[in-house]
Image (cartoon, rainbow, N blue to C red):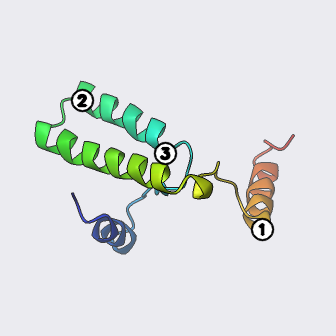
Amino acid sequence: MKDQLRLLRDCIYNEIPAVVFQGDDSCAPEILEAAAEIYRRHGCSEEFLYDWQLLVDEVKAYQAECPARVKLPRLSPSEAETVRDDMARKGLAR
């Protein structure tokens, strides 16, 4: 499986946007499986899809072993405030 930490560091170093799903995110398996299907439809190699499936399986195994840690992700209060401020500036606040 790809070195996830190296990939993230490369993105940060090269200022490439990145998305991180933690293993305790209750939505992660479903999101990763949907991504696998999208990659398949767009013609990713079997090797890539195999490697991706290893990641999906690892997340599922983690969640099965540590069910008490699995949760729906939330923003911290300060993160939520920052997002609300941004939404207000853009006229999107409710």
Above or below for 5 versus 25: below
- N-terminal of the two: label 3 or label 1? 3
Q: Is mark 3 on a helix, strand or loop?
A: helix
- N-terminal of the two: label 3 or label 2? 3
Q: What residue type is labelled 1?
A: Ser
Residue position marked by numbered label 3 in the rendering: 28
Q: Which amino acid does label 2 sit on?
A: Arg
Please state the horizontal and vertical placement of residue 31, each as a whole percent of the image. 46, 38
Please state the horizontal and vertical placement of residue 80, each as a whole percent of the image. 76, 58
- N-terminal of the two: label 1 or label 2? 2
Q: Nearer the viewer, residue 30 or 42?
A: 30
Picture disc at residue 20:
none
Q: What residue type is labelled 3?
A: Ala
Q: How far apart are marks 3 and 2 (CA)?
A: 18 Å
Closer to viewer: mark 3 or mark 1: 3
Above or below for 87 versus 81: above
Q: In which quarter of the image is residue 7?
A: bottom left
Identify which residue is drawn at 40% across, 32% down: 34
Q: In which quarter of the image is residue 83?
A: bottom right
Q: Is mark 1 on a helix, strand or loop?
A: helix
Q: In which quarter of the image is the C terminus?
A: top right
Residue position marked by numbered label 2 in the rendering: 40
Picture disc at residue 78:
1
Please state the horizontal and vertical placement of residue 48, each as a whole percent of the image. 18, 44
Q: Is mark 2 on a helix, strand or loop?
A: helix
Task: Rate crowding at label 2 as few (under 14), some (14 to 19) or many (20 or more) other CA atoms within 10 Å.
Answer: some
Q: In which quarter of the image is the N terminus?
A: bottom left
Identify which residue is drawn at 21% across, 48% down: 51
Task: Rate crowding at label 1 as few (under 14), some (14 to 19) or many (20 or more) other CA atoms within 10 Å.
Answer: few
Q: In which quarter of the image is residue 62?
A: bottom left
The furthest residue to the right: 94
